[in-house]
Image (cartoon, rainbow, N blue to C red):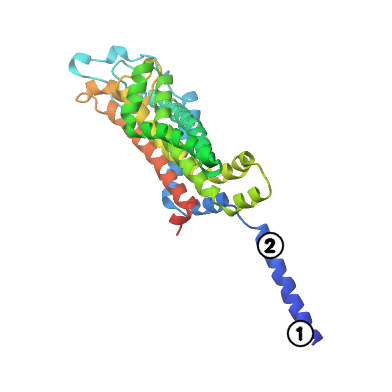
Amino acid sequence: MTTISGKKREKIDRLAELAARDDERGVSLWQEAFRRLRRNPAAIVGAVILGLFLLVAIVGPFLVPHPADAQLWKGEIRDNIGYFPGPRAENWFGVDHIGRDEFSRMIVGARQTLLVGIISTLIGLAVGSLIGGVAGAAAGLGGKWGRALDNGLMRFVDMLLAMPSLLLAISIAALLGSSLTTVMIAVGVVSVPVFARLLRGSMISQSNSDYVLAATSLGVKKPKIALTHVVPNSLAPVIVQATLTLATAIIEAAALSFLGLGNNDASIPEWGVMLADAQRYLDAAPRLAVLPALAIIVTALGFTLLGEAMREALDPKLRK
């Protein structure tokens, strides 16, 4: 009997030890998502593309072989017969229509494109999260007056959503004038309703959770519940959406620059502006349009692949 009890105690102690180890090794939602991402080929491809893009954008401008705005080979241009020196030892991508090194401009342009994409996404994320956070807290925890506030904010968001995104961005850029700052603001405003509705919906869903009911029953004030509990647990889909929005922000910023609403300083290269400048020389030097177009496509693809993989890793409905 003593031996049997001793064996049972050993088994129970061993089980408790293993359970304690499991608790110590427990992983959070983000750690589990990271494990899933490491096994996702699309996420790996997207991460590699973005890693190269970030490396080129951050380090590349310090290593370019020639100044991006220097017209060092202007004397070799034969515009009347459509001759522009192509790729060679000193100019890996050839020269553009006014004798500037195309490779150096592509490298420096990566930083400008990254800057536009990140700042415009941050503008949309900040404003959209503010609107969505207030609306979500009001709808989920605010009672009658909260629902009225939520209704008013969402009607404003619906007005923004009713307009095609590119048309809205063009309208804002046309009102503010052509500049790099204008492009950032216009593209950022376009993404505001997406972030607002996403955070609002996530917060309303979280407001019905058991931990909110428990905190309310303990007398915790509703603003504190919203800020310290509901908002942090609602940010995962918003962060994933920010990754996807970076892809569309780069494309929309390039579209505005292509339409002549972007940066007017020709000395600062930007892929959308380079693509617009190359339209007149498609027959003589198609590479001037192909190179920035491919750069925009591949970069947007990298953000999209990584964003979709993150969405699948974080969304319980999409986990396999």
Whether residue 70 is situated above or below residue 226 in the rendered picture:
above
Marks 1 and 2 sit apart, C-alpha to C-alpha, by 26 Å
Can residue 50 be seen in this snapshot? Answer: no
Residue at (26, 15) in percent of width and height: 77
Q: Which of 204 and 294 is in front in this view?
A: 204
Whether residue 264 is situated above or below residue 56 in the rendered picture:
above
Can residue 42 be seen in this snapshot? Answer: yes
Residue at (37, 31) in percent of width and height: 160
Task: Say which residue label 2 marks.
Answer: 21
Where residue 142 appears, as percent x and y from the top left, is 55, 40
Q: Residues within 10 Å of mark 1 (few under 14, many from 20)?
A: few
Task: Say which residue label 1 marks.
Answer: 4
Kind of residue at badge 1:
Ile
Corner quadrant of residue 172? top left
Corner quadrant of residue 255? top left
In what element is the residue under mark 2?
helix
In what element is the residue under mark 1?
helix
Where residue 8 appears, as percent x and y from the top left, is 74, 79
- Judge left or right: residue 66 versus residue 259: right
Residue at (30, 15) in percent of width and height: 98
